[in-house]
Structures are given as structure tokens and as C-alpha cells.
Image (cartoon, rainbow, N blue to C red):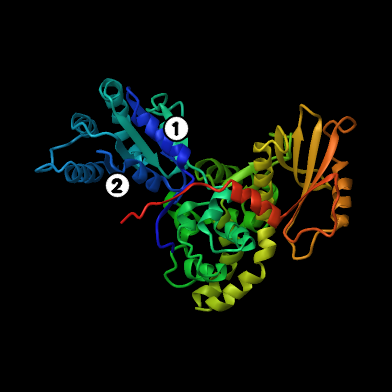
């Protein structure tokens, strides 16, 4: 684990919170995102040196939640004795009357079953919104937060003055946690742990990636050993079918029919499960070929979270070995497959690199994404509608330098892409871990070494917080 706690790449979020704090009017902010995405850390950083209150909803039953929140409030406000509070509306009005600002209620979605959200709406409308108060509601159950805080049917609909959904770090930010690693190992680590700050913060980059996988994921007591299962179990009453679906996607099934077959779930039943994984848990994403968004029968499904993908692709199939104490054997089997697994993530990183090029004005595009047809698949295409230009990209995560055959194959595949076929200008883009055996002045060529320079240029600000 890193010796010092570091704060990385949340500058824009902090600026937004500070702006709301300085506002002359009442502000209600909803902040949400998956577990370990960094909400608590962000809010703790924001509250530093402020006379605020930080409450956590630990219970979903009304009496227990009220008592616990009252106890937290009593301690933080240093009251001589706990006030008698029988309704959430009393709690909210007490908070407002004490002059504390800002006020954070974490895991607020747990108030839904207690009636606490509806009472908050009433308190906000009649009293809180008329004070100079910054109220922050934070939650980690993505679907539940969106349902009770953002949907048209929600008691809080239209009350939030700002909404912030925290997402995983991109590669340029995630690699800042891994300063002692080579660029190749940074890519592999991103493929394994993704951009989730809570996972990245556990990595000890004085140890090898292989050692970190063992200590964080495989060994007895490893902090992430059961993380993917635990997340599902805390959000779902019956996680087993969802696990079957995630395993099917991790094994390479991307079409709905393929996923249903592998998961052994009837096709007419799987839609609701997919909706939960996609919309409520934010674990699965639906993709379409570039420029064919919403096209019937074209959707493919992928796991959004790299660590979930790693765990269900490479760890879960070896669970029996791990349970028998054969951790070393399981690790060896995982390590043999690590580069084949990483190649998928290298495509993600290449798209992020190309996007940074656009930010610098070196390329221009209006749409970017993977494209496929019945017989052809292209890692990604970027199109510039204003200039009738299409960029076709191939990404190679291999130990051998990329040769001209890859370029010729990409040129051939590009002919299948129908957009402005007779009018467009084609530009070919090659990404290669090991570099190239050739140079072509008409081709954009990026080795991992070249990519590293741009990522370094766009590395985030790092603050050493030294929080005790």
C-alpha cells in the first residue's frame, strides 16, 4: 500500500464543490458512483478546515437509522446530550438551526425505505432551501440513487442544484499511482485493477504486479479477494444469476443470445437482469458499431469495470485452486494469460490516447468507437464529419514489432466501412506495444514509448495529503 495518501485528479470536482460552498443561496448537490470510486475521500478532502457535518446512514430501518444519525450529530456538534428526535424532519431542521455548513449525508439512498427522503423534500421546500446551506447527498448504489434522487418520480426531483457522478480514472490518471512501474506494467496493472481509486490506492508499486495480484486478490485475507461477489451480494437479493451473466460476458459472450446461452438463462428472462447490471449497478455497458447507435440486433455487451473483468475472467475459474491453498499454481496460470487479457485494455488506452491527441489539436474527430459488421471488426474508427475524414485504427499488444502486413490488413478492412465511402479521406492509425519494423509517412504510428510521452504530459496534479 502507498505510504502516503495521495489525492489525484479530482480538481474539477473540488472546484465545483468550493463554488457551491461560496454560493449565496442554498445548494443541494447529489454525488454518486460505485463503491471505492472515491466519494468519501473527495468529501473528506472538501470538508477539511470547514465547520461541516458528515453523517453516514448505516441502517435502512427507521428507528435504528434515526438513533444512529442522532448519535453522530450529538458527537459532531458536541451537544451535552442527545436531542429527542422522532422524525427525520426534526433531524433536518435541527441540523439547519445549528448553523453547520456544509452538511454531508453519505449513503443517503438507505433512507428511501425509512421515509427519510420524502421528509427531506418537505424540509428542503419549506425551510432548508431558504438558508445559506450546502447540503450534499452522497450514495454508492448507482441505480437506487438515480431512482430516488434524479428520476421524475423521485421526491427530490428538480431540487438538486448540481449533480456529480464520479467515474473511474482514465489511464493517464491511474498510472500516477504506479510511479515505480515500467509503462508495460502500468498498462497491465490498469487492465487488472482498472481506474477505481479504491483499488489503485491498495497497490504497492515497490512490489511487482504479480506480487500485488497475490497479496490483494488471491491470498487468505486479501482485501479484494471477494470484492466482486461482495458488491453484488450487498446490492442484490439473489446474486447467483447475475454472476452467471457476468461470467458469460467475461468469457467472451457479447451478444444477448450468446450471453443467455452461456449463462443458461432463457432469452426472454435475461433482459431484466441485463437492465439491472447496466442501469442500476453500472457494471455492464451496451455498445453499438460506430454511427449505428440503437440499431436493432447490433448491440454488444461488455463489462465496464476492469477489475470485475479480470476477476471473472482469470480468478473465478481458479477459485477451487485458491480454496485448496494452491495460490502459487493459480497465480502461475493467471500470469500465463495476463498479456492476452491485457490486449483488450490496450484498445481502451489507445482510444484515450487518441482523444488526448484531439485535445492538443493534432487530430480532429466528431465520433469515435469500435466498429464491426458481419465479417469485419476494426479496433476503433474516428470520423471528422467537417473534413470528410475517417481514421482507422489497429492496436497490437504483442512482443514483436508490428510490420506492414498489419497496415495492409487494416486498409483492406477499412473498405467495409460504409460512411461516405466514395468521398472520404482515409487515415490509418497503428498502435503497437513493441514498436514497428517500418515507417510510413501517410500512417500515424504510436509505440508504447511514444504514447508514454503524451500520458506524462497529461498526468494529473498529485497532492500528498498525509491524512492520519
Q: Residues within 10 Å of mark 1 (few under 14, many from 20)?
A: some
Tally the marks. Answer: 2
* Residue 259 in sight: no
Residue 217 position (above or below residue 248): below
Residue 220 position (above or below residue 185): below
Residue at the spot x=61%, y=69% of the render?
A: 334
Residue farthest toward the left in the current orientation of the protein: 80
Residue at the spot x=64%, y=66% of the render?
A: 338
Residue at the spot x=80%, y=58% of the render?
A: 436
Residue 94, given in percent of the width and then of the height, sits at: 19, 32
Residue 85, given in percent of the width and then of the height, sits at: 16, 37
Q: Residues within 10 Å of mark 2 (few under 14, many from 20)?
A: some
Where residue 287 sits, quadrant-wise, is top right
What label sits on residue 59 in the rendered view? 2
Residue 172, given in percent of the width and then of the height, sits at: 58, 49
Pick the front one: 346 or 113: 346
Query: Is the residue under label 2 in contact with that under label 1 (CB below 8 Å)?
Result: no
* Residue 251 in sight: yes
Q: Left or right: where does residue 138 sit relative to residue 97?
A: right
Instruction: Measure the C-alpha gap from mark 1 to mark 2.
Output: 24 Å
Q: Element type at marker 2?
A: loop
Pick the front one: 241 or 40: 40
Where residue 268 sits, quadrant-wise, is top right
- Residue that badge 1 annotates: 163
Residue 396, given in percent of the width and then of the height, sits at: 75, 57
Pick the front one: 357 or 408: 357
Q: Earlier in the sequence, mark 1 or mark 2?
A: 2
What label sits on residue 137 in the rendered view? none
Where residue 71 sits, quadrant-wise, is top left
Image quarter where the N terminus lies is bottom left
Residue at the spot x=35%, y=40% of the render?
A: 108
Q: Element type at marker 1?
A: strand
Amino acid at each position: 500500500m502507498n505510504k502516503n495518501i495521495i489525492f489525484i485528479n479530482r480538481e474539477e470536482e473540488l472546484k465545483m464543490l468550493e463554488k457551491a460552498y461560496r454560493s449565496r443561496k442554498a445548494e443541494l448537490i447529489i454525488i454518486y458512483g460505485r463503491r471505492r470510486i472515491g466519494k468519501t475521500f473527495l468529501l473528506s478532502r472538501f470538508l477539511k478546515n470547514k465547520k461541516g457535518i458528515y453523517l453516514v446512514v448505516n441502517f435502512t430501518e427507521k428507528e435504528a437509522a434515526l438513533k444512529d444519525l442522532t448519535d453522530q450529530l450529538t458527537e459532531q456538534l458536541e451537544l451535552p446530550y442527545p436531542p429527542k428526535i422522532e422524525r427525520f424532519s426534526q433531524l433536518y431542521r435541527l441540523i439547519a438551526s445549528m448553523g453547520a455548513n456544509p452538511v454531508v449525508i453519505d449513503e443517503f439512498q438507505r433512507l428511501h425505505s425509512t421515509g427519510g427522503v420524502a421528509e427531506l423534500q418537505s424540509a428542503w421546500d419549506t425551510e432548508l432551501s431558504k438558508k445559506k446551506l450546502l447540503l450534499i447527498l452522497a450514495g454508492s448504489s448507482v441505480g437506487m440513487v438515480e431512482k430516488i434522487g434524479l428520476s421524475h418520480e423521485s421526491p427530490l426531483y428538480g431540487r438538486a442544484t448540481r449533480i456529480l457522478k464520479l467515474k473511474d480514472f482514465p489511464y493517464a490518471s491511474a498510472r500516477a499511482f504506479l510511479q515505480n512501474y515500467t509503462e508495460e506494467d502500468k498498462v497491465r496493472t490498469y487492465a487488472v485493477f482498472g481506474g477505481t481509486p479504491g483499488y489503485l490506492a491498495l497497490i504497492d508499486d515497490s512490489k511487482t504486479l504479480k506480487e500485488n495480484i497475490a497479496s490483494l486478490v488471491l491470498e487468505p485475507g486479501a482485501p479484494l479477494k471477494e470484492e466482486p461477489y461482495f458488491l453484488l451480494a450487498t446490492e442484490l437479493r439473489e446474486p447467483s444469476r447475475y454472476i452467471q451473466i457476468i461470467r458469460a460476458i467475461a468469457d467472451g459472450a457479447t451478444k444477448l443470445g450468446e450471453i443467455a446461452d452461456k449463462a443458461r438463462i432463457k432469452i426472454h428472462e435475461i433482459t431484466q437482469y441485463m437492465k439491472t447490471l447496466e442501469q442500476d449497478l453500472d457494471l455492464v455497458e451496451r455498445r453499438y458499431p460506430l454511427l449505428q447507435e440503437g440499431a436493432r440486433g447490433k448491440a454488444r455487451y461488455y463489462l465496464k469495470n476492469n477489475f470485475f473483468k479480470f476477476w471473472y475472467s482469470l480468478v473465478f475459474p481458479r477459485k477451487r485452486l485458491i480454496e485448496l491453498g494452491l495460490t502459487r499454481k493459480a497465480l502461475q496460470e493467471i500470469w500465463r494469460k495476463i498479456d492476452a487479457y491485457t490486449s483488450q485494455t490496450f484498445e481502451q488506452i489507445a482510444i484515450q490516447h487518441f482523444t488526448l491527441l484531439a485535445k492538443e489539436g493534432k487530430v480532429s474527430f466528431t465520433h469515435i468507437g469500435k466498429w464491426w459488421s458481419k465479417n469485419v471488426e476494426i479496433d476503433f474508427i474516428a470520423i471528422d464529419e467537417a473534413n470528410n475524414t475517417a481514421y482507422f485504427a489497429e492496436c497490437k499488444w504483442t512482443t514483436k514489432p508490428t510490420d506492414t502486413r498489419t497496415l495492409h490488413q487494416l486498409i483492406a478492412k477499412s473498405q467495409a466501412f460504409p460512411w461516405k465511402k466514395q468521398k472520404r479521406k482515409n487515415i490509418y492509425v497503428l498502435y503497437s506495444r513493441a514498436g514497428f519494423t517500418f515507417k510510413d509517412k501517410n500512417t500515424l504510428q504510436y509505440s508504447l514509448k511514444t504514447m508514454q510521452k503524451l500520458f506524462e504530459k497529461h498526468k494529473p496534479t498529485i497532492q500528498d495529503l498525509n491524512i492520519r
